[in-house]
Amino acid sequence: MVVRIVIGLALTVVAFALAGRRLWWLYRVGRAGQPAPERIAAVRTHPGRDAEVETTEVLGQRKLLRWTVPGIAHAFTFWGFTVLLLTILETYGSLFDKKFPGIDHWSFIAFIEDLFAVLVLVGIITFAIIRLRNNPAREGRASRFSGSHTGAAWLVLLGIFLVVVTLLLARGAQINTGDFPYPHGAFASQIVGHWLAPLGTGVNSVLETTFILLQLAVVLGFLVFVTYSKHLHIFLAPVNVLFSRRPNALRGLEPMRSGGKVLDFEEADPDTDVFGLGKIEDFSWKGLLDMGTCTECGRCQSQCPAWATGKPLSPKMVIMDLRDHALAKGPWLLAGSDEAREKLPEAVKAEAQRPLVGTEEQNGVIDPDVIWSCTNCGACVNECPVDIEHIDHIDGMRRYQVLIESAFPVEAAGMLKNLENKGDPWGMGEAKRAEWMEGLDFEVPVADGKLGEEVEYLFWVGCAGALEDRARKTTRAIATLLHTAGVNFAVLGPAETCTGDPARRIGNEFVYSMLAQQNIETLNQAAPRTIVASCPHCFNTIANEYPQLGGNYQVIHHTQLLSKLVADGKLTPVSKVEEKITYHDPCFLGRHNKLYSPPREIMEQVPGVQAQEMHRCKERGFCCGAGGARMWMEERIGKRINTERIDEALTTDPDTISTGCPYCLVMLGDAVAAKKASGDAKDSLEVVDVAQLLARSVTTPAAAGTSGDSQAGAGGAAVAADD
């Protein structure tokens, strides 16, 4: 027994020393990142909410269980290891021939331990089958494990298998020697004990000691291995989930910070302040924690529209490449002086000099085509089981490229110039913002200063809604419906300017800040009770990003208001629309703000409509390709994202495709036009906003604005920017 104790304790000391040393090093590397005091403050402010999130996301495995088979397998493994922590304590007790007093007669515990040991085996066998079926060598890009470190994953599966097998063998031998603490319930251990019984008590005594030590060796070896592999997420995932933003790290982008404080452009110092993410140490400690938490599961990659259409962006590999770079640069970050850095190996010094974003010739960590392929759709963040915030990291790198390097897609330069000089992406100016009202049979009130108490809603039209021909039809339909319902509303007209969303999403925080502050001043003067926005990008920016600059408003999307008006009986759809319609979820309305029901509720109330969902819808909806300022960038690599989405829509054989976003209206409309030209779509197929659909049923086509919108200019500019 003395030998058993000495070996067991020696293994423990060595393993804890190796794992502890590695964890301390990782902690120090993480602390090299920028401060993130807002994360700690949020946890302190909402402890109850965070406890609920930890319960549902970590213990409940909510996101993982969306993928039924792998989700259940992971749940078996996670819950199994949680339960089997008790058996590790029992194993240490066995070193000293000690039993846990008071529970040695609890057969229920023996049953639960064996049950979860078996479930863990079922889980890892399932994982093995999944990995064999999704082999990157065979499936290529189609495999969500493409680019992952699959060798380490197989070692982990082997390690888990050995943990359970040595446990059951040790328990089986203990049953035969009479040292097992539980009289009943351990059904799996009893089966193993039955297999070992013919060997006799003496041999089982040796096997007991052998497998107890082997189990400790495997468990402790697994502990050390985890600290050096992607399975570090076992320890980091609960922490990362705790400090993630809510809900699911979507809604607004984080403001630019330097030294933990929000950057003020008027007081910023180019020599000392951090402008975006230009070096790995410019990431906050939460960003570095994201990198260490990645499980390489590939769920984000499998849902990414850029990856699905042949572009180089894989959200998973962005995080992996950043993590590998951070670990390789770690010694440089931790060196205390220039002299210490000079003594580092050449490989470390070379890694420290790599640009964060750069071409292969520049030896960049992340290729420029990767960050400019992102549509900010949020599919990656929505799928990530450990709440990694890919969008903030990608847009942070964009900020540095735009503000410091002046390196961004050349075609976007015109859009940024137009925003700065004219206040809209097309450069049409404020004089054009009221043209959509021409031809309406009622007057639309234009706010001049503070709104009167009688005005219920300020209708935020948005650049596309005011200037793009197709989106103008939606704007006219919304205004007509509000007028029909007797809603007292007003618009800003020429006083409205771009919210700044395209500038912020491309990385030009300076132009965004300028536009946002101008709008906040206008809105504060108007003092609206509620703002209703027809564009999800405007809705998201005003509702979720303007508060960062002191602009706090009650904001709703037009589908929310129209759905309420129908429910309250103020709008009554009467004319039948005998069409098969499939609805496309805008990313900034759906995933970013969790608004899936209002547009569908409107369609349900229109007589004659046959709604048909696409395969990818709601939380799993597929992007149109316009977000992240992609609307103003050429799509030169792979298949066009809007074409991919229309191909999916056509599988439902629709008469009409509906949506709730002017960007989606333009992108999907362009793809439909191309399909019609090639003969792959029927000539009658059209893309409309749900407001137009409702207007067809509530009002006459003329009143809904299906005529009188032949102005040239805005629509042509939109198509030119996208082709």
Image: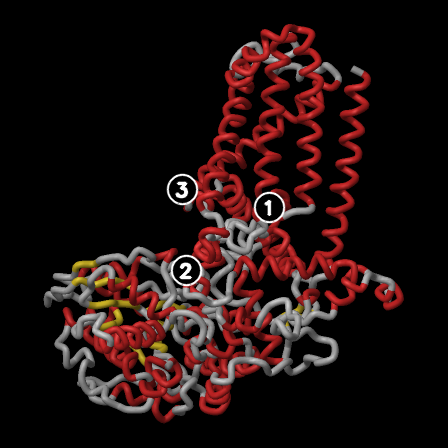
Q: Is residue 588 above or below residue 248?
A: below
Residue 185 appears in view: yes
- The first of marks 2 and 1 along the sequence is 1
Residue that protrudes farthest toward the front in the picture:
138
Q: Secondary structure at mark 1?
A: helix
Residue found at x 70% / y 57%: 327
Percent coordinates x, y for residue 494 in the rendering: 38, 89
Residue at 64%, 74% (x, y): give it. Answer: 361
Residue 45: x percent and y percent? Answer: 59, 54
Quadrant assignment for the C terminus: bottom left
- The answer to whether residue 19 is left or right of residue 470 is right
Instruction: Tell which circle, 2 or 3, labels the residue nearer the N-terminal end.
Output: 3
Which comes sooner in the sequence, label 3 or label 1?
3
Instruction: Judge from the rendering whether residue 367 lies leftward or rightward of residue 352; answer left or right.
Output: left
Q: Residues within 10 Å of mark 3 (few under 14, many from 20)?
A: few
**Residue placed under numbered mark 2 in the picture:** 591
Q: Is residue 617 left or right of residue 312?
A: left
Q: Amino acid at mark 2?
A: Arg
Q: Is residue 38 above or below residue 691?
A: above
- What residue sits right under mark 3 in the picture? 68
Distance from Cα at disc 2 to Cα at disc 1? 33 Å
Callout 3: SS? helix
